[in-house]
Amino acid sequence: MIVGNRKEFQEIVGMLGSNRRVLLLGCNECVTVCGVGGEKEVGVLASELRIHWKTAGETFEVKEHTLERQCDYEYIDQVRGFVGDYDVILSMACGAGVQYVAEAYKTKLVMPAVNTTFLGVTLEQGVWSERCQGCGACILDMTGGVCPIARCAKSLMNGPCGGSSGGKCEVDKEVDCGWQLIIDRLTELGQLDRYEDIIPVKDWRSSREAGPRKRIREDLRL
Amino acid sequence: MKTNSKIEKIWDSGGFIVTSECGPPRGADAEIVRKKGEYLRGVVDGVNVTDNQTSVVRMSSLSACAILKGMGLEPILQMVCRDRNRIALQSDILGAAALGINNMLCLSGDHQKFGDHPQGKNVYDIDSMQLIQTVRQMRDEGKFLGGDEIKGKPVIFIGAAENPFADPFEIRAARLGKKVKSGCQFIQTQCIYNLEKFSRWMQMVCDRGLHEKCAILAGVTPMKSAGMANYMKKNVPGMDVPDALIERMKGTPKEKQAEEGINICVESIQQLREMPGVRGIHIMAIEWEEKVAEIVKAAGLFPRPEV
Ligand code: SF4
Ligand code: SF4
């Protein structure tokens, strides 16, 4: 899933500026699972904002609304009836959702309340960890199911570098060395001989390097 | 393909190689490079020029190499994959060859987190293994990575680094094997303080026959003080400094510690020379280039061969 962090409250207030009528829009998908932008978090942020402006003695209006998804037009369209009542849409979705809402309401200010961080997994309640950078040409079959692009701080195709120490990355003693994980997994699979293969220079065109990506499935189109 | 590299010539003639390094200054003063170069003239066979080491901005390695080359020294261009993509790397390889630089050291590079611009974005379009392959392809096949033909091949002797003390230890010789398979012809190791562990690594290297395909240069760094020894142990990733060594430095009066650091370095060189498979020494006297001549002489490695 997509993992994010909610922005600091002061940053959000600064961003909103003089806009005092806010449509606070949550999303029921990834950001709900990672606890940053679902119905519950919409409620929390809305209360924080209300208290803030009340304490300041100013008028303020916030409408809480959580969509099934902010990355599909049919859901975004559901707020069309009342979007005009607000100065700004403050979206708690991932960056994709925020942008798609902005595309749908061309003359409306749309702002992000969340910093979108990575594609990852839930390690335990309240802990998420990055796993994939969406390179567009997956090589997990060659690396024991551990991604060197997302999990090595230098995205080395042929690691580990000289800084790998005690299973940890040179960048941070709290972070596992991705290449140590690859070697451990290859060992467990009895495939350590695969380590002798040199992974060739990557064609990054499948990644973001060829410009923004788009995918068309003719078989699914209407 | 044979190059004009002095390192390659000594390797071919069966000699023992001695290299050192010169860290470019954090400014545009060419005199600093010349001064450091002067300390190394005639006492080593090749001089590495670091490429923004520890991710701190310095004068470019290529420029400092050109200055040293102009002085008649034999520079070894260090090139890291952190800051340049394949276009810039290949362009600099051509530029280096055009300036008469005969040697290159292909490195991944320290993460920018350690430097003076931790806010920066890194590149890592290719890694050190693939950089080795790139130089070999450009030189031997006369082709760019993209496949186009090169007019005027860069004739460069290809080196890389390896850290025998990084983890997992068991695959370190295998990793060197991959570098050799990629086209690496000489290796300079991380600074060696734990000679016992190094000899175990060297054994694995020899078991794979890698010492016959690639010149292994054992890396040493003289310690200036007990404080530096301690710092290296605690703060430099992948550095193995045995406690006994720190004790020995600590047990030496402060004003004698630098001298003791040199003594330890010379003793290490003498032991390393005797190790099967070791074909040279790489002396990394960090901001202490003036001591290299003394070390080389005390270790009995002077004069250097004429090739
Ligand atoms: S190889 Fe690419 S697609 Fe596969 S996990 Fe890594 S970044 Fe994601
Ligand atoms: S220590 Fe491991 S994860 Fe960190 S940069 Fe080196 S190889 Fe990559």
Image (tube, coloured by chain):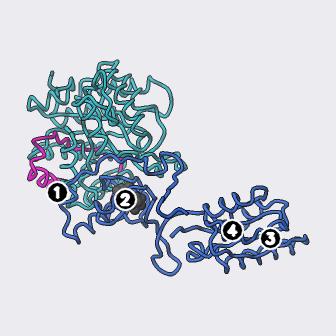
Chain colours: A blue, B cyan
Q: Which residue is mark 1?
A: B196
Q: Of residues B147 and B180, which is closer to you in this image?
A: B147
Where are the magenta residues, as a range? Answer: B197-226
Q: Earlier in the sequence, mark 2 or mark 3?
A: 3
Q: CA distance from mark 2 to mark 3?
A: 43 Å
Residue at 56 percent of width and 75 percent of height? A34
Q: Secondary structure at mark 1?
A: helix
Q: Which mark is residue A59?
A: none
Q: Foreground: A119 or A178?
A: A119
Label 2 or label 1, whichever lies nearer to me, is: 2
Q: CA distance from mark 3 to mark 1?
A: 76 Å
Q: Which type of secondary structure does the marked residue at label 2 adopt?
A: loop
Q: Position of residue A75 (x, y in %)?
A: 66, 71
Q: Nearer the viewer, mark 4 or mark 1?
A: 4
Question: In the rendered structure, which amino acid carries the disc numbered 1?
Answer: Glu
Name the residue type under label 2. Cys
Whether marks 2 and 1 lie on the same chain: no
Q: Dot 4: what SS?
A: helix
Which amino acid lies under the numbered mark 3 shown in the image of this protein? Gly
Q: Is mark 2 within 8 Å of ligand 1?
A: yes
Residue beneath the point at 8% across and 32% down: B14
Q: Which residue is mark 4?
A: A76
The numbered disc on residue A138 is 2
Please say if A93 is above or below B37. below
Q: Is residue B263 left or right of residue A122?
A: left
